[in-house]
Structure formats: structure tokens, C-alpha cells
């Protein structure tokens, strides 16, 4: 049975952030949890699908692998480590709430140094590059860890000290009537420490702006709106915290010959009407070179011929699409006198513009027109 797309299972977009994934999981898990659907096998199956999708998409490394290779990324795991067997329906409601909201209501924990910002880079590819795969070199302006203080923000040889206001907790308490309200320290802004001697290069920020060169491996078969996630290649975090991630957003440029639809390629092939009428063999382009295509006698304009295996190799399931050639019968132009005479004689041999014998579609059309007007006169 073909597995469903994990993003569709959770009802989220491919660019969904971690918070959106958790919210979608919480909503669906509460709805289909076996404890709320006693004896409902369909709900149990649905819950397993939801939990499987969540555990893949919430894990940065697994999500990156899935975005690039689909379910094939875990094919080996499925065979060797009983991957699906790890998804069960024993999740408690408290686990669902805790997983989703644990990062929102943090209790009295002091504020951790912020992870660096995620970045998005728009990368344009030609159709050939997207189909075959390529390694692209890019340069991005980015906040990187200071090479003098190594992200601490403090002058080398000195350290950050506990905040004198909150005494290193990152929180202060304010009494209001019968209540005591806890809020973020206004001196250290929840960081719990302060810098007495800021680094001379980054001025205490721990980060400096610097261009970064990256080599990105583009897998064969990638398409517009796909993205590649590079873990920890985003902006450096504060106070030496982990860097964010870099998302490379793919756009494939329009091709002069081929149009892509999923893993199939489409192209329009014009032929003259004598080949269409008598049949013959023509050359058609593919991304691997030219091939011969046989045109049967009596081929009509708009007829499509499918050439198997000449499309795009799927980045998800490894299957190759097809090339569909749509025939356009071209009306001849710039005729000389001899050609006009031959065409006139040919037209006369058809027995008029209806062409009852040689043009069956014309005959059906005009027969229908006659019936239409006959019905109006009744």
C-alpha cells in the first residue's frame, strides 16, 4: 500500500515551522487517539499515521532526508530496524500536551541563549540541472560566530558574570497586592549573565556579518517549490548558541522546448500536413538527445504520443516519467504557384469542403449542423 505524504497527513505546508507541526499533531492526535475512539480500527490506523508523520517531521535530520528523498529515505530503516514498529498508540494525552506546549509555558526556567535565525535562499535552476542534479556554489551574507571571542561576546580572558539584578536566574519577582508576579529581568533580558568587558570586534554580540560560501548538492529530479534544508548553516546563535538552519528554495526556469508536469515532460512537435496524412518518421528532442518517432497515416492535430522513460527521475520514489509529444499539424504558408495548383487539385478531389470521405470529423460536424437547423424549423 502506497504511503501518504507526511505533510498531507498532518495537513500542513512544506514550509511549516516546528510550532505549526506541533499544533497540527496535537489537534489530530486528540481527535483520533484510541482512548477517545474505543474499538475504532480506522481511528487507530489514522492515529499511527499521524504519529509517524509527526516523529519524522519534528526531527530536523529525518525531515531533511524526507524532503529530499521522500519515503525512500527510510527504506533501509524499515527493513533493518522495524521502523514502523516503533509507532504505537500508547501515547498519553498528557504526553501530547506536554510535547506541544512544553516550549510555550516554560515555568521558572531561565531564558536560554537564542538559537540563530533560520535563513531562506532562493536558487534558480535550468530544467537540465534540475533533472540531472548538480552541485551549486552559493555565497550568502550571514551572521557568523565571532572569531575573536568565539561567540561569547566577552573579551578573551574574561567571562560573563551573573546579573546583579536577578542574581543569575534571568527572572525577577514583583509584588502586586496579594500576588507576586514573575517577569523577565530588565537588566540582562532573561540571559542571567552580563558582559563587563565586551569583545572589541563584535561589541558583545558574539556574532559578525560575513559572507559564507557553500556547496549545495542538488538531487536529480528536484522541482519548483521543493526545498533543501541545511542544518546549522543559518545565522549563528547568541552567546555561542547553535546556528539556525538554511532553507534553499528551488525554482526551475521555463524551458524553450519542454514543459514539466510532475515527472512527465511535454513538448509540442509541428509537422506538415503531408506527413500527417501519409505517415512517416520524424525526429523529436529528449533531454538525452534526439530519437525517431513514427507518425501513423491520418494523424490529427492535437494527437499525443507517449515515449516511455524519457521524462524525469522522481526524487521520491526513483521512478522515471515519460515524454509526451503533442502533434501540431501546420498549415503551409508562402506557397508558390505550383504548390497552390497541387493543393487546389487535391481539394477538388476531396469532393468539396465537407470532405465526406477523407475528412470524417468535418462530415460529422456538418451533419450535426444540419440536424440542428432541421430541429429549429420543426
Image: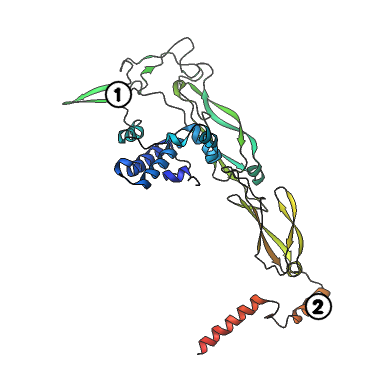
Mark 2 vs 1, N-terminal side: 1
Seen from the viewer's position, the closer of residues 219 and 170 is 219
Tell me if 313 is positioned left or right of 43 in this view. right
Which residue is located at x 36 percent, y 24 percent?
Answer: 111
Classify 265 as above or below 162: below
In this rendering, the answer to whether 363 lies above or below 194 is below
Residue 365 visible in image: yes
Q: Is residue 120 visible?
A: no
Measured as percent of width and height from the top left, residue 104 is found at: 34, 32
- Identify the residue under disc 2: 341
Tell how many labels.
2
Tell me the element at label 1.
Answer: loop
Q: 31 left or right of 2?
A: left
* Badge 2 element: helix
Q: Is residue 190 left or right of 136 when viewed as pictured? A: left
Q: What's the residue at 63%, 35% (across, down)?
A: 136
| Residue at which label 1 appears | 108
Image quadrant of residue 342? bottom right
As measured in the structure, the alpha-carbon distance from the residue carrying label 2 to the one carrying label 1 is 95 Å
- Left or right: 302, with 276 as reference point: left
Amino acid at each position: 500500500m502506497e504511503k501518504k505524504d507526511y505533510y498531507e497527513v498532518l495537513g500542513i505546508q512544506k514550509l511549516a515551522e516546528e510550532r505549526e507541526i506541533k499544533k497540527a499533531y496535537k489537534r489530530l492526535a486528540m481527535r483520533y487517539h484510541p482512548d477517545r475512539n474505543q474499538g475504532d480500527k480506522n481511528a487507530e490506523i489514522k492515529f499511527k499515521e499521524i504519529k509517524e508523520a509527526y516523529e519524522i517531521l519534528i526531527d530536523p535530520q529525518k525531515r531533511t532526508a524526507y524532503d529530499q528523498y521522500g519515503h525512500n529515505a527510510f527504506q533501509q530503516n524499515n527493513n533493518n530496524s522495524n521502523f514502523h514498529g516503533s509507532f504505537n498508540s500508547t501515547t498519553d494525552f498528557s504526553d501530547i500536551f506536554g510535547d506541544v506546549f512544553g516550549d510555550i509555558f516554560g515555568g521558572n526556567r531561565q531564558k536560554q541563549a537564542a538559537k540563530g535565525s533560520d535563513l531562506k535562499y532562493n536558487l534558480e535552476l535550468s530544467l537540465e540541472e534540475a533533472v540531472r542534479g548538480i552541485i551549486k556554489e552559493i555565497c550568502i551574507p550571514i551572521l557568523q560566530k565571532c572569531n575573536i571571542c568565539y561567540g561569547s561576546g566577552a573579551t578573551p580572558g574574561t567571562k560573563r558574570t551573573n546579573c546583579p539584578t536577578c542574581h543569575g536566574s534571568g527572572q525577577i519577582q514583583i509584588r502586586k497586592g496579594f500576588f507576586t508576579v514573575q517577569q523577565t529581568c530588565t537588566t540582562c533580558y532573561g540571559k542571567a549573565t552580563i558582559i563587563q568587558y565586551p569583545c572589541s570586534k563584535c561589541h558583545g554580540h558574539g556574532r559578525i556579518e560575513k559572507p559564507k560560501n557553500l556547496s549545495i548538492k542538488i538531487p536529480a529530479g528536484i522541482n519548483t517549490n521543493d526545498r533543501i534544508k541545511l542544518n546549522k548553516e543559518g545565522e549563528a546563535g547568541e552567546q555561542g548558541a547553535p546556528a539556525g538552519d538554511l532553507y534553499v528554495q528551488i525554482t526551475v526556469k521555463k524551458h524553450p522546448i519542454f514543459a514539466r508536469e510532475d515527472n512527465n515532460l511535454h513538448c509540442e512537435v509541428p509537422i506538415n500536413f503531408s506527413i500527417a496524412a501519409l505517415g512517416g518518421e520524424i525526429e523529436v528532442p529528449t533531454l538525452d538527445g534526439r530519437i525517431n518517432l513514427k507518425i501513423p497515416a491520418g494523424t490529427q492535430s492535437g494527437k499525443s504520443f507517449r515515449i516511455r522513460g524519457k521524462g524525469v527521475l522522481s526524487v521520491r520514489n526513483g521512478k522515471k516519467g515519460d515524454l509526451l509529444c503533442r502533434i501540431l499539424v501546420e498549415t503551409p504558408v508562402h506557397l508558390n504557384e505550383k504548390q497552390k495548383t497541387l493543393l487546389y487539385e487535391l481539394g477538388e478531389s476531396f469532393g468539396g469542403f465537407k470532405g465526406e470521405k477523407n475528412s470524417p470529423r468535418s462530415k460529422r460536424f456538418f451533419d450535426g449542423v444540419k440536424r440542428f437547423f432541421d430541429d429549429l424549423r420543426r
